[in-house]
Image (cartoon, rainbow, N blue to C red):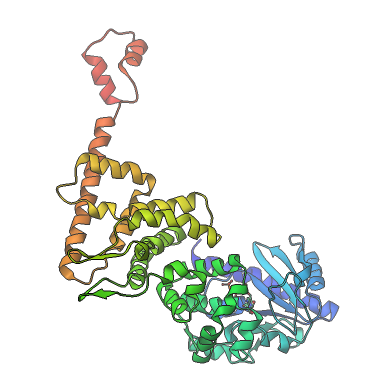
Amino acid sequence: MNISENRYSNLLKSKRIFETISNVGNEIGQDAFVIGGYVRDQLLNRETKDIDIVAIGSGIDFAKKTAKKLKSSPVKVFKSFGTAMIIVDDIEVQFVGARKESYRSNSRNPKIETGTFEEDQKRRDFTINALAISLNSKDYGQLIDPFNGLNDLKNKILKTPLDPNLTFSDDPLRMMRAIRFSSQLDFKIEKETLNAISKNADRIKIVAQERITEELNKIILSKRPSSGFKLLEETGLLKIIFPEFQLLKGIENINGKSHKDNFYHTLKVLDNILPFSNGNLWLRWAALLHDIAKPNTKRFNSTQGWTFHGHEDKGARMVPSIFRKLKLPLDNKMKYVQKLVLLHLRPISLTNESITDSALRRLLFEAGDELEDLMTLCKSDITSKNKEKKIKYLNRFENVKEKLRDLEDRDKIKNWQPPIDGKEIMDTFNIKPCKEVGILKRIY
Ligand code: CTP
């Protein structure tokens, strides 16, 4: 099934869900609207996943009645949030009653005050996420767009419906969501909204780490992660949520000798790795962390200039604490990132003289299944603006790659054993050792 067929089938499924919700609303005299991401993504021609429904009155009751009609999964009720969820044909449908006050709250027992639909739309994060479509029989299918979200969608603008200071104080995670949507959709954050992020950045501290990291991962997996990181840095969020990464920024100069800005270098490496890391969040994390220990290992001496000796080793040792702090998994994924950080200099550090079979075997052995990703990271790390240097490193890299391939082929030949040994052949055919045993072994 190709994508358009997939989308078409999803549309049909959603159509059935919307019509049922409309009928339920009619029966029980409650209005309902589809709102947020679903509407935004349909208008942007993007794949849509979940459906968010706002009901006027209780969202939970509405969900229960809809579930019965659609014979969906059992209703999952989140009482303290006043929301309910059902799954129909693999589509998650979330129901919520319209609210007057803060849309999301960080307290465990958020105060939920029911409100009108207009009040609910005002309390949403961005104008493009406040777009709604009526599911009510009187105006079924009509777009409800009180904040010109459609215009912002066309002009690729992220803007809060209310004063951004208020929208962000309702839920400071929205500051990260702004940057995430901007890197996912390639949208600009409107000036006043962007200024409010800088002003309120400190408030991110009250948000649960898991929610912050979820947005960070979405930025890393987006189309333009480097622009997301630049925005995180410019607004002051980065130094709060990921101080180790902030420390990469800056250039020092002693006696006219300076080093490259490792923040921008790392982002370049991330950009370089994008086409090869489709969906591989952990390869992207490895790119982000490969030079993370450079600030800690930076030294200056008049003969060599700036050095960062041992940054790969120290960096690998920093990975677990960073993962722990960010509440990222501490399993194989962390070990994978750690391995790539530790070995990222290895392939390129092998020069013609040092490319011995045993050095290559050591690399093959240490990299194991991660060899290909390591080579991708290593190649992406060649960002020098100096053309000669760049060519030199690329040549070295290709040379190592070629030699690795050659060694693997030779080792395969050397280690190749026929699947059947001579004894088995002699026993099977009841013959004594002779030339034919060798012939049969080779045929197999
Ligand atoms: N919303 C909000 N403030 C938040 C989170 C969500 O106002 N902090 C509202 C927005 O209207 C959003 C809707 O709730 O569109 C659904 O939220 P969510 O599912 O988290 O995001 P989506 O917009 O659907 O986008 P995605 O699925 O890509 O996260």
Q: Quadrant of the C terminus?
A: top left
Residue at the image point whose x is 59% and y is 65% from the top: 210
Q: Nearer the viewer, residue 26 or 422?
A: 422
- Please state if 420 lies on the left or on the right of 32 as rendered: left
Residue 376 appears in view? yes
Q: Eyeballing the image, is 232 above or below 433?
A: below
Residue found at the very far right of the displayed protein: 28
Q: Nearer the viewer, residue 69 or 315?
A: 315
Ligand 1, by image quadrant, is bottom right
x and y, in percent, of residue 213 in the image: 54, 66
Residue at the image point whose x is 31% and y is 73% from the top: 261
Residue at the image point whose x is 49% and y is 49% from the top: 332
Residue 42 appears in view? no
Determine which quarter of the picture holds residue 117.
bottom right
Residue at the image point whose x is 24% and y is 68% from the top: 384
x and y, in percent, of residue 298 in the image: 31, 64
x and y, in percent, of residue 252 in the image: 29, 74
